[in-house]
Image (cartoon, rainbow, N blue to C red):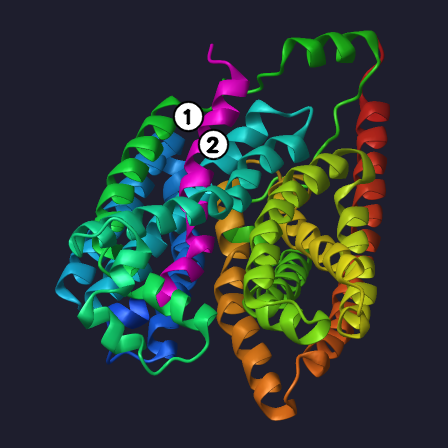
Amino acid sequence: MKNRWLIALSAVGVHASIGSVYAFSVYKKPLAELLENASNNEIAWTFSFAIFFLGISAAIMGHFVEKRGPRTSGRLAAMFFGGGLLVAGLGAMMQNLYVIWLGYGVLGGIGLGIGYITPVSTLVKWFPDRRGLATGLAIMGFGFGAFFGGPLFQKLMTQFGLSAYSVGSLAEAAALPEIAAKVATIADQTTQNQHIAAIVAAKGISANWFIMGVVYLVVMFSSASYLERPPEGWMPEGMEKDLASGKKKITVDISQQTANEAVKTGPFWGLWTMMFINITCGIAVIYSASPLAQESIGLSAAEAAAVVGLMSVFNGLGRIGWASASDFLGRGNTYMAFFIIQIFAFYALPNITSVLLFQVVLYTILTCYGGGFATLPAFIGDLFGTKQLGAIHGYVLTAWAAAGLAGPQIAAYVRTVTGSYETTLYIFAGVFIVALIVSLLMKAYIARATARNAQQADLAMAEQPAG
């Protein structure tokens, strides 16, 4: 029998690898230098494609994950994600944006989707006593992936870029005629230094993707090789003792449904709607956090970048924190808390002038954003059972694909029309009211369904012959 905590650690290995996709912003300026004819929007599509194919592949491959198991699925995810980075590295070497789209966006995105759903249903089965904690542990890794990956990618690109220019520092690179000519017209020293760093890093993008492609392939493949489902009906020893002594009672899932049955129900679309709203608004904040911090509280670009880095920490902490809390609060109450908090947070954020308070509110939003992802698998298990949890999870994650396109576009459009992010945040505060109403309807459904199931169980016991 395998150790369930090592199973959880393996799941973290998979998720921390694919979570590096949230560090894509470190590639934006170097890619702009590498691909001089590509617009910012065209470069941004690299990330958008990755998120889109994440959602689509999660939906399409959910049945495959359930049928073939976590080990095979995880290894396949490793090949797609790691291989996608290798193809992207080839595209960077060729200075071909379309090959980068194929590698990072399409192949990498498919690896993201399969890798994201692969460990989740397995962990729910290994932790029947703490579903929220189990899924929170794995999905926390996705939130932390960018925190560790971003600085590492920047370091690799810079080091290989300096080697390509045969210099030992950015100061030496700045003295090279070809680089000096490119930055000669930039008056501001800070902006000039950032431009020099991007020019140097552009030379190291391909080497970075080649190295990280191999690293993630090995880490994900090794982690997936330990993943395994527990025997049918397995329980941890402590839980068995508690059940035998009457300290705990088995919480019966509301229903046991296949993925194709689940998508025809109201609760499925309630989950989908709540996730779409939570992700759309959260991604919009992630997308606009740096300029919002500079405009609202006057941070410098470097200070705003530090704030963005800490956002990934609270994104990860929210995943483990909220998911664990949902074991005690209940999933419905947890989602209600997300939306109540964010209604006030989004309304207050554009009016905050205190640097400290601004960050507190911003990081609170990020905990709710991450918590929504981490609490979702346990919520699915409560509503539809674990029979095809991975497939149902994949279907719900199509909301991520849609929100990944909608969030940044809405934020950018309203910002262009109004000239500020204030109106955008007010709109999202209003949208969260819709999400809160949906969560109240979900709670009402859960209460009715639980009462109905209890009544049916009582009737079944009453009909059993005595003795």
User: Which of marks 2 and 1 precedes in the sequence?
Assistant: 2
> Which element type, helix, strand or loop, lies under badge 1?
loop
Amino acid tagged 2: Ala
Q: Which residue is mark 1?
A: 227
Q: Which residues are magenta?
A: 1-30
Give 69 or 42, whichever is nearer the viewer: 42
Residue drawn 24% across the image and 52% down it: 162
Amino acid tagged 1: Leu
Whether residue 16 can be seen here: yes
Q: Quadrant of residue 138?
A: top right
Residue 224 position (above or below residue 466): below
> Which element type, helix, strand or loop, lies under badge 2?
helix
For residue 329: magenta?
no
- Provide residue 407's location: percent of width, then percent of height: 56, 71
Residue drawn 33% across the image and 76% down it: 42
- Provide residue 127's location: percent of width, then percent of height: 61, 25
Label 1, residues with CA under 10 Å away: few <14, some 14-19, many ≥20: many
- Provide residue 54's location: percent of width, then percent of height: 41, 56
Whether residue 49 can be seen here: no
Give 212 or 191, whichever is nearer the viewer: 191
Residue 11: which disc? Answer: 2
